[in-house]
Image (cartoon, rainbow, N blue to C red):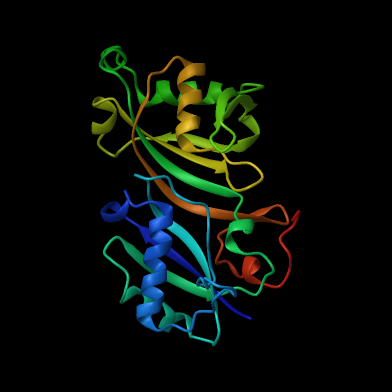
Amino acid sequence: MNIIRVKFIRSDEIKYISHLDIMRTFSRAIRRSRIPIDYSKGFNPQPQMVFGLPLAVGVTSEAEYADFQLTDYVAPDDFVRLLNGELPTGLKIVKAAYNYSKNNIMSAVDMASYKIRVRVSEVTKNRGITVDDIKHKLELFTKMDNITVLKENKKKGEKSYIDIKPMIHNISVEEDSNGEYSKAGIFIISALLRAGGRANLKPDLLVEAINSNMNIDFEIGHIHRTGLFVTKNGKIYEPLDPQVLSENKVAGR
């Protein structure tokens, strides 16, 4: 079976396109490129492709992934060239490799990293809050025994309290080199969070939890995904790492 995995960028030009429309865009590009894609069986055959963790509308990314099942072998470099020739501005394949594992990209991914640009209110900014202040608050935040938030299940139309502490792998705050961001009350939060079917923490819910527990009034300006990751044998890998693409099954799956 020829399954090729690609890494692609989703930039500003296309950040307001839904995940479903992104899939349709790839489907049309595949068809126009004449790449030998395999199709599902039945009355309405669909291209055999699987995408990683969907992005919310308005979020950009430098590390999205998808698997494509082909009927014939296509060299990875040729696949990238042919598909990029048909994709619109804002979508670009940057790398491809064949996947020999038993896990598709959606089932394999279990972590995601983000850069979240946030702004504090004028009242907070006038208090002279600094990057060191934010770092201290985030340190206290991560040391909490439990971080409980109210999460909505849109499919079931229900809300329930969950502890997101186990879903936070790492969190930090960054400052630009000249300090202009912090002077304007703008900070960049970097976070590595659990993602996927088993446990999924969205960055906007993380910011909501920081605000409610640390008495901060962050407003999200922009969210950018910097990576998707796979945990294997206790180590974290990118989805195109040879350790992930090998035949060995991902640990714990």
Q: Residue at x 23, y 32 (%)?
A: 180
**Percent position (x, y) of residue 85?**
31, 77
**Percent position (x, y) of residue 28?**
37, 71
Rendered image quadrant of residue 127: top left
**Percent position (x, y) of residue 119?**
31, 27
Rendered image quadrant of residue 81: bottom left
User: Where, quadrant-wise, is the C terminus in this rendering?
Assistant: bottom right
When the figure is inspected, residue 180 is found, relative to residue 44, above or below; the finding is above
Q: Residue at x 55, y 72 (%)?
A: 43
222 lies left or right of 70 = left
In the image, 71 versus 190, the foreground residue is 71
In the image, 66 versus 40, the foreground residue is 40
Q: Residue furthest front?
A: 43
**Percent position (x, y) of residue 56?**
42, 45
When the figure is inspected, residue 107 is found, relative to residue 147, above or below; the finding is below
In the image, 245 versus 57, the foreground residue is 57
In the image, 33 versus 8, the foreground residue is 33
Q: Residue at x 55, y 60 (%)?
A: 238
208 lies left or right of 175 = right
Answer yes or no: is residue 81 visible: no
When the figure is inspected, residue 106 is found, relative to residue 58, above or below; the finding is below
207 lies left or right of 126 = right
User: Where, quadrant-wise, is the N terminus in this rendering?
Assistant: bottom right
Answer yes or no: is residue 17 visible: yes
Q: Residue at x 39, y 52 (%)?
A: 61
| Count of marks overlaid on the render | 0
Rendered image quadrant of residue 20: bottom left
